[in-house]
Image: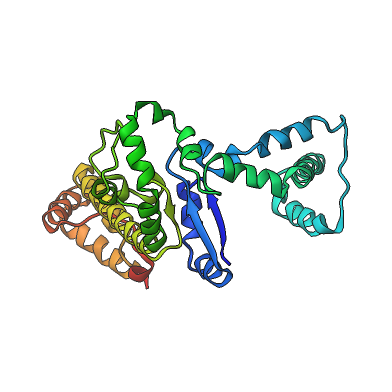
């Protein structure tokens, strides 16, 4: 038996769940972890589509004014850790209000989160039992699908489900090969399955294909950041005055090199003349006023 869980698929969530420690935990505990299609959690996320949130808010609203939830042993350590985490940023009174509010929410959740309400979320979204009609009824674009296209999509559910089980993702090519009509009005040229994960359709986050894709995207992102820093540095070097460029270079020197430069500066006709001379040299060399790395300092 395997356990299934899902999240909205925000970038920060994905970054955390793609950590190796979390992935190892999922593997050990036999957990399949998925994200819902981008910007569709309200209709595709089982917990969002179920009456869970509504029931919890109703339970909170029925708590009497001044209600003070009981602090049982289960939450004693949690409360202590919260107080420590808040440190000196909040007054003692403010900490009390925050903790009491959190405990009220926790108690309301504990009273309303039942197996029946969880099942309702999966049922209305058509996730379990698998129900094509229920799933499509959650989609506003269903009215734009012809009866023939709708029936064809329904016939392909089994085939596409098998592909998803094997790879953890359905590509645009998979959709095209199976004749699934595309009704999206998206002007972006990059296919959805090649975008960053939080902008894709539903994917199984701990599938091998998804893990490799995330690592590749993170590598490309880091490369773009390095290129952006380099470009900014190039632009900065071009935009600096002679005096600013000289000072940036001078500040990178060791103490002994600075002493030697001061002597050189006096022999070169003074500070202004030396700044101009050195700035010409630095620009010709392509010197860039970036901060030294720890490796450079070492």
The front one of 220 and 177 is 177
Q: Is residue 98 above or below residue 228?
A: above
Q: Where does residue 130 sit, x and y in percent of width and height?
A: 51, 48
Count all numbered tags in the image, as a single digit.
Answer: 0
Q: Which residue is drawn at 48% across and 68% down?
A: 20
Is residue 214 in sight in this rendering? Answer: no
Q: Which residue is drawn at 29% across and 37% down?
A: 182
Q: Which residue is drawn at 26% across and 47% down?
A: 232
Q: Quadrant of the C terminus?
A: bottom left
The front one of 28 and 270 is 28
Q: Where does residue 102 sit, x and y in percent of width and height?
A: 75, 43
The front one of 275 and 241 is 241
Q: Where does residue 276 sit, x and y in percent of width and height?
A: 16, 49
Residue 31, by quadrant, is bottom right
Q: Is residue 79 above or below residue 42?
A: below
- Kindly give the residue lying farthest to the left in the view shown: 284
Q: In this view, does 31 lie above or below 95?
A: below
Q: In which quarter of the image is the N terminus?
A: bottom right
Left or right: 132, with 148 as reference point: right
């Amino acid at each position: 038996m395997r356990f299934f869980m899902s999240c909205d698929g925000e970038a920060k969530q994905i970054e955390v769940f793609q950590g190796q420690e979390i992935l190892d935990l999922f593997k050990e505990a036999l957990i399949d972890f998925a994200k819902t299609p981008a910007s569709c959690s309200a209709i595709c996320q089982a917990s969002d589509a179920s009456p869970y949130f509504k029931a919890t808010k109703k339970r909170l609203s029925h708590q009497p004014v001044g209600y003070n939830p009981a602090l049982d042993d289960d939450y004693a350590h949690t409360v202590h850790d919260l107080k420590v985490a808040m440190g000196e940023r909040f007054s003692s009174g403010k900490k009390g209000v925050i903790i009491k509010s959190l405990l009220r929410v926790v108690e309301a959740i504990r009273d309303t989160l039942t197996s029946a309400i969880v099942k309702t979320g999966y049922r209305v979204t058509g996730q379990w039992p698998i129900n094509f009609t229920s799933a499509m009824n959650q989609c506003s674009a269903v009215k734009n699908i012809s009866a023939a296209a709708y029936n064809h999509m329904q016939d392909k559910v089994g085939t596409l489900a098998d592909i998803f089980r094997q790879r953890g993702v359905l590509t645009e090519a998979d959709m095209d090969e199976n004749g699934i009509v595309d009704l999206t009005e998206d002007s972006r040229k990059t296919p959805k399955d090649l975008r960053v994960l939080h902008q894709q359709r539903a994917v199984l986050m701990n599938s091998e294909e998804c893990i490799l894709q995330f690592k590749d995207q993170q590598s490309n992102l880091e490369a773009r950041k390095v290129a952006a820093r380099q470009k900014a540095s190039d632009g900065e070097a071009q935009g600096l005055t002679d005096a600013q460029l000289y000072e940036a270079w001078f500040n990178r020197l060791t103490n002994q090199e600075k002493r030697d430069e001061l002597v050189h500066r006096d022999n070169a006709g003074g500070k202004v003349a030396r700044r101009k001379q050195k700035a010409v040299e630095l620009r010709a060399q392509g010197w860039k006023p970036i901060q030294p790395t720890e490796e450079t300092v070492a």
